[in-house]
Image: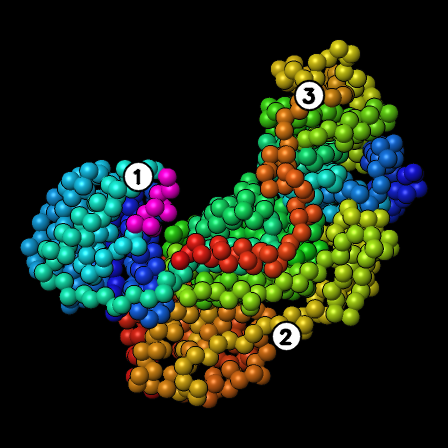
Amino acid sequence: MDYTIKIGGEAGQGIQTIGDTISKVFSRMGYHVFTHQDYESRVRGGHNFYQVRLSETMVTSSRTQVDILVALDKESIKRHERELGPEGIIVYDASSLKERHDKPHFLDVPFNELSLKAGGSPIMANMVAIGAILGMIGINGDVLHSIIKETMGNKGEAILKQNIDAFIAGRDYAKANCLRCSFFSAPSSKPKMLIDVNEAIGLGAIASGCKFYTAYPMTPSTGILNFFSSKAEEYGIVVEQAEDEISAINMALGASYAGVRSMTGTSGGGFCLMVEGISLAGMTEIPIVVALAQRPAPATGLPTRTEQADLFLALHAGHGEFPRVIFAPGDPEQAFYLTNKAFDLSNKYQIPVFILTDQYLSDSRWTYLGFDLDALTYRAYRLKGDERVPETYKRFAYTEDGVSPLAIPGKGKYIVVVDSDEHDEEGHIIEDGETRRLMVEKRLFKKLPFIKKEMESPRLYGSERPDIVVIGWGSTYGIIKEAVDELAKRHSIAMLHFSEVYPFPYYTEGFMEALKRAKLTICVEQNGTNQFARLLKAETGFDIPVKINRYDGRPFLLEELIEVLNGHIGRL
Amino acid sequence: MVTLEDYKGQTPAWCPGCGNHSILKVFKEALVELAIEPGTFVIVSGIGQAGKFPHYLRCNAFNGLHGRTLPVATGIKLSSHDMLVIAVAGDGDCYGEGGNHLIHAIRRNIGVKLFVHDNQIYGLTKGQASPTSIEGMKTKTQPFGVLSEPLNPLSLAVALDCSFVARAYAGDQEHLKFIIKEAIRHRGFSLVDILQPCVTFNKVNTYGWYQKRVYHIEEGYNERDRFVAFEKSLEWGEKIPLGIIYRNERPTFEERMPVIKDRPLIEQEFDFEEVKKRIDSTLGEFY
């Protein structure tokens, strides 16, 4: 079982409700799901779609071929009919689209009429559509009752019943009328967790002791702000929507100085506004975690689309020289653990740590059996109170590893002085060259080797001695992994995926050998200028000869990537 | 007992005769009179001559970026709201570079006490106009004189229902001390605009210029009437009022933030094992 369901229509038609609900039904039934969304920067109208891939085994990418296309408007048929597989069906409501299709791969389900008959309003037509999808695959959808109950809250029994009736009407209608439907459903199993990367980052942060999140809304990072807000009361987190991103990072730094683990998140444009604050974190050595959800730029770019073009921005953000860490998780699971690591490292070394994601990751949902909470770490690094801090405490005391003990202000006779100016050990402004030299060495050169040692090697997946290595970082993890799975049937091939991007991991541990030994190395990036390939070359001297780039704002799809990779392999 | 000696800080790098010296002196005296221990509070500052202020007295200090004093102070206050958080800024710092933050800090009524050293000129960058420079003032970078209307911070604050709005003058030390103490005692956000002569670059707004114009707001003035306050805030020119222009007791931001109602954020210990258990049940929501 490996089906792709695509729901297309205008913004505001309820595409997301349908997509979210069927994904939840599938994952609760124990199937694996991968979803991705394609939408315009508008609230109503335009053309959007939501794609759900469903399988009994782990799926980590979207496919080009569609099995069920739910067309909520004419445009969806026009655009996506050609994506239909040989067994594919387009399900639509002829009366509301005001057009009838007689070709055998069309199934007319009167969404509106059935929903009215079930006693519901036209809004519930979406429940009929959900029913139709499940009916076509032959899924009874008993779990839907509880899912509707959870999402509807206490809107009352009557409304709940209308929804269920609408769903049943759609399901039974599709079962009875889709004579051409040849889909089958694998036996269900243990419920799976369905999660996106923004939720995983939020959870990872909360589990790491983050108590302060401030941000200015910006697609595609807003999901993190939403998640923190939804958990603020339960976990006792101060969440504040700042007046701008400059304020957001400075507030977060204020909180961190005061002794609270804090975080902010944004997208490229907002990150640009934060950049001076990041430099401030560098100079004052205040721990901070920043999520940077990339989208196509320059400037406003394509606000709701995807790109991986801010690696160099994160790498060089902030004037001057100071250490930083950059993580680029490939999926929600990695995001969860890397966020935990981000908090640990930022507090251990008193540095900014960036978590790079993008729109594709932010708007994709993945399924897992669960996350392992025992793999999380928490170490308290702060000094608090009189007994541990002498009155002569120096915030920037010189130490062997460059890390000066960080005390919480206001809790004793000692004082904590930090300054954006170059400063002495106590934190006061200096002008002399010798102190400057010592401070640069303390916060940069002494810390760097220790930080570098913390970086994990990239993941080599596939053949152990591959002829072909496909290199990626961040959000291309799932797609490259599946492409490699497919190509491994005929080739000796592996993926080399980097999620801990900077400082570049020490390369004595094997992955460089794999690159040097391979007959063909290919770097896949969702940008135009091979930013990661260039970083790899700068750090290791290794020049990846073949690059695959995509910069139209759309993610790679499985069949497309396999075809492009095959093209290069064919020239071997 | 706290004494002035406890507050001894670095040696100021301000020009001789600068209004900042008297602000610093009076500030220390006010802290001593309020019996505030040096380790118990924090001063946040930005960049400019005023930005150096926290180095010159012994205190917890966050000397951050130009214009960003209030966001940092807000972050600190939300984390540790039982701690006194003072913000010190200049007119360029707070009314220019950081203007947006001022508006929103007032809206929040975050319990930060803001003191703006307002010398109506840029000192650190050597004599350019500031947002409060008077119209027509010629400088090296305003060759035709200042063409914009000066910002009136007090009217702005009253318009936003700022919960404490006052003006003081560096040359009137006893009154300045009184205002500093009142601002610190106030629960919500306090804005104190301190007229501070810049002896090096501002040749218009000199001690003599201020001396001729300032007066203490008359007895019987109703500082709780917003309309009266707005009118008072507009007074400028021949007569410049000193004193508390406006105040109200609207709830502070930290009082309205439910998660810190019982205890400051920093006092809410993080129990890793306990949180992991709760995360485990939160993960249940995703199934």
Kindly identify which chain the residue marked by label 1 belongs to: A
Instruction: Between label 3 and label 1, give the one nearer the viewer.
Output: 1
Per the model, the C-alpha gap separating discs 3 and 1 is 54 Å
Identified by mark 2, the residue type is Lys
Instruction: Between label 1 and label 2, give the one nearer the viewer.
Output: 1
Q: Could one spot residue A360 in this view of the protein?
A: no
Kindly identify which chain the residue marked by label 3 belongs to: B
Identified by mark 1, the residue type is Glu
Measured from the top left, where is residue A294 in percent x and y?
A: 46, 57
Name the colour scheme.
rainbow
- Badge 3 density bin: few <14, some 14–19, many ≥20, Cα 10 Å: many
Which residue corresponds to mark 2? A453
Which residue corresponds to mark 3? B246
Q: In screen coordinates, is A530 left or right of A35?
A: right
**Residue under the point 69% across and 25% down:** B165
Query: Both on one chain, marks 3 and 1?
Result: no
Identify the secondary structure beneath mark 3. strand
Q: Earlier in the sequence, mark 1 or mark 2?
A: 1
Kindly identify which chain the residue marked by label 2 belongs to: A
Per the model, the C-alpha gap separating discs 1 and 2 is 58 Å
Q: Quadrant of the C terminus of chain B?
A: bottom left
